[in-house]
Structure formats: structure tokens, C-alpha cells
Amino acid sequence: MRLQVRFTRMLALTAVVIACGAARASAADLAAARKNYDTFCAKCHGDSGQGNGSQAATLGTKPASFADCSAMAKLSDDAIFKAIKDGGKAVGKSPEMPAAGEAFEDSEIRDLVTYVRSFCRK
């Protein structure tokens, strides 16, 4: 019985350690996603994701506002992923949104999707 209690406690402690490690990795991934966003996306979508970046006025179509929660709720993660990877035209959005599939690994694009979602604060 005592051995079973020790084993159960050890399993619980292992789960906590694994969860803490995953949280740190996630935070690191989001930090990298923020850096990628700031470098490649902010010039059109803006620092706070409102579609008001320094180059937004030069575009024929206003960039999407990621802070618009009702608009973002209508977009699946897969659609956002595809827009980043294959460009806006691939998802029926502006063809001015360039494809970034050559610049990012799929995992980096998934992290960007998560980061873009963070602009919508209800």
C-alpha cells in the first residue's frame, strides 16, 4: 500500500514537472512568434494588430484587424494558418497579403496563429 502511495505521488510530481516545462516552451514559442510578427506582420497589421501598420495606408485593402473579436471568431485557426502560409488570396482575402510559407516552418506559423489570436481581448 505504501509503495502504491509513493508511486502515485511520483506520477503526480512528474506530471507537474512536465506541465511546467511545457508552459516554458510555450512562452518561448510565443516570444519567438511575437518577434516574427513584429518583423514581418506589424508593418501592415500594426503593433497591436488593429490593421493600422505603417504601410497599411499604401494598400488597396485595409489589413485585417486581429483585435476585432467578432471578425476573428469567424476565422478558424486553419484559415489563419493558410492565409499566413499561402497568402490572403488562398483564403479569399486580399491578394496583397503575401505568402510566408517559405519564411516560416509550419510550427512557427502555428505559433503566429496563437499570437495573432492574443490581440482579441474580450
Image (cartoon, grey):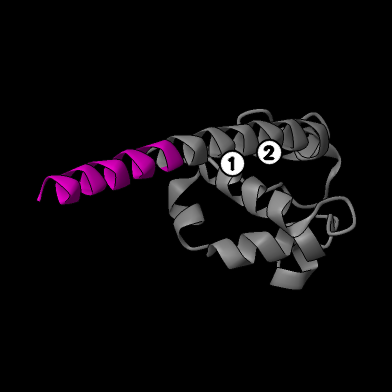
Does residue 55 appear left or right of residue 73 in this picture?
A: right
Give residue 29's position: percent from left, percent from top: 64, 39
> Is 110 in front, or is 17?
17
- The residue at 74%/59% (across/down) is 106
- The residue at 62%/32% (across/down) is 28
Among the 4 quarters of the image, the one containing residue 19: top left
Q: Amino acid at mark 2?
A: Ala
Ranked by sequence position, the earlier of labels 1 and 2 is 2
- The residue at 76%/40% (across/down) is 41
* Disc 1, SS: helix
Residue found farthest to the right: 102
> Is 92 in front, or is 115?
115
> Is 91 in front, or is 107?
107
Q: Label 1 neighbourhood size at 10 Å, few (<14), some (14-19), many (20+)? A: many
Does residue 74 appear left or right of residue 11 in this picture?
A: right
Residue 87 in view in this figure: no
Verify whether residue 17 appears in magenta: yes
Mark drawn on residue 33: 2
- The residue at 80%/33% (across/down) is 43
Verify whether residue 51 appears in magenta: no
* Disc 2, SS: helix
The residue range painted magenta reads: 1-18
Mark drawn on residue 115: 1
Q: Main secondary structure of the magenta part?
A: helix
Q: Are marks 1 and 2 in contact (CB under 8 Å)?
A: yes
Give residue 34's position: percent from left, percent from top: 67, 33
Among the 4 quarters of the image, the one containing residue 92: bottom right
Give residue 59's position: percent from left, percent from top: 83, 46
Give residue 76's position: percent from left, percent from top: 53, 65
Residue found farthest to the left: 1
Residue 105 in view in this figure: yes
